[in-house]
Image (tube, helix red, strand yellow):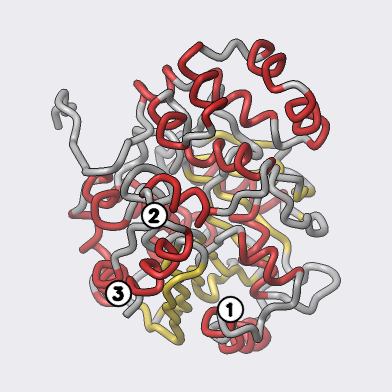
Amino acid sequence: MAIQNRKREIPGTILFDGEQARKGYALNKMCYSFNLAKNRAAFKRDPEAYYEKFHLTETQRKAMRSGNVLEMLAAGGNAYYLAKFAGIYGLDMQDIGAQQTGMSKEAFKARLVKAGE
Amino acid sequence: MAKIVGAINTTHVPLIGRAIHQHLEHDPYWKPFFDGFPPVRDWLDKVKPDIAVMVYNDHGLNFFLDKMPTFAIGAAPEYVSLDEGWGIPTVPSFKGDLDLSWHMIESLVDDEFDITTCQEMAVDHAFTLPLKLLYPNDSQWPVRTVPVCINTVQFPLPTVNRCYKFGQAIGRAIESWESEARVVVIGTGGLSHQLDGKRAGFINKEFDLMFMERLVTDPLWITRFSIEDIVEQTGTQGVELLNWVIARSALQGDVVKLHSNYHIPISNTAAGLMLLESV
């Protein structure tokens, strides 16, 4: 079977493929470090020093500073690793979902409930 | 020879860990989800498996993108639950079964599945929460475990057909092990959900219910879908249904569904549960 050269377009969806994995490596590696409490504390103390330590690209630093999840994804972030970053700020998946879809948290939650009807 | 007593598939949403910790089982939000489990616990109490083979995906606890195996199997005396970064409580460590681990590794490689073996392995919520849901009151885990970890994080992912065949090979491996042990195969994750992107919050009830039905009556149905098709139909994290496919195909031949539950939403996820036995 031939490898598809043209990427499949799924609206509103980024497949975390080789291109994303290459682009996002530093950002995801930083987020992976947040498994350890001492690293989460170090990040909170000085985010800029932490970005430097993990050699984040300028685009990735800007995305992190803005707190904008769609920008973090565009910079190669992977949902599973970004979740660890979100955890530092006590954000849950409905906060993240609401932000990405431009909805209020209540509206986002209501839409989830509606999907079950 | 060892006997596979059945297969269980269940969602592994992290928030479940917090709900268990805060005793929210009877809270109106959680009740329809937790109410699915007593029949499966009763069944476990009846068939009393000695070992649980856990088919799951790691979410950046044991594996990072520096080394990402497609199929990895634990061969450790013990598997530890560790902090994943967002505060769900850890649980006591799980005992391994080195004899079954190495028998599976040898059998699977002989069957042409070139897996990664892990003599040390931390296990995340995808492994720990299903066991906590199935054995909520046990102070010590009543089963030994073998982790089977599938890459659902970084594309390319294994095809559905490959996963189906991998599950069959796991079934053959377990059933060719010279032991009196009783083994349950547990697939975790799914069903439809998407955490990331503008389509975050996507859920597809119709597809999930069809998938659950066909898993019993026509398990090859899902193999007609490409990974991209599965993402389109079930969301970026809905691909975790690969773990369900593997657990199902570990049961040889026809199966009967003893119990199922399906509830939307738990966090951003359509929560599914199935208990299957070979006919």
Residue B185 to residue B276: above or below:
above
Quarter of the image where the N terminus of chain B is located: bottom right
> Marks 3/2: CA distance?
28 Å
Horizontal relation, residue A20 to residue B29: left or right: left
Q: Is residue A59 above or below residue B44?
A: above
Q: For mark 1, what is the residue?
A: B30
Q: Could you tell me how many numbered marks the image carries?
A: 3
Viewer-proximal residue among B20 and A63: A63
Residue at image location 75% in from the left, 21% down from the top: A46
Label 3 close to label 2 by CB (< 8 Å): no
In the figure, residue B53 lies in which quadrant? Answer: bottom right
Q: Chain of mark 2?
A: A
* Contact (Cβ within 8 Å) of mark 2 with mark 1: no
User: Residue B206 location in percent, x, y?
Assistant: 24, 72
The residue lying at 55 percent from left, 34 percent from top is B116
Mark 2 burial class by Cα count in 10 Å: few <14, some 14-19, many 20+: some
* Residue at the disc numbered 2: A103
Q: Which residue is at the front of the view, B7 or B177?
A: B7
Screen quadrant of the C terminus of chain B: bottom left
> Which amino acid is tagged 1?
Trp
Q: Nearer the viewer, mark 3 or mark 1?
A: 1
Q: Please tell me the numbered disc located at residue A23.
A: none
Q: Is residue A85 left or right of residue A37?
A: left
Q: Nearer the viewer, mark 2 or mark 1?
A: 2
Q: Amino acid at mark 3?
A: Leu
Q: Amino acid at mark 2?
A: Met
Label 1: chain letter:
B
Tell me residue B29's x, y (percent): 56, 79
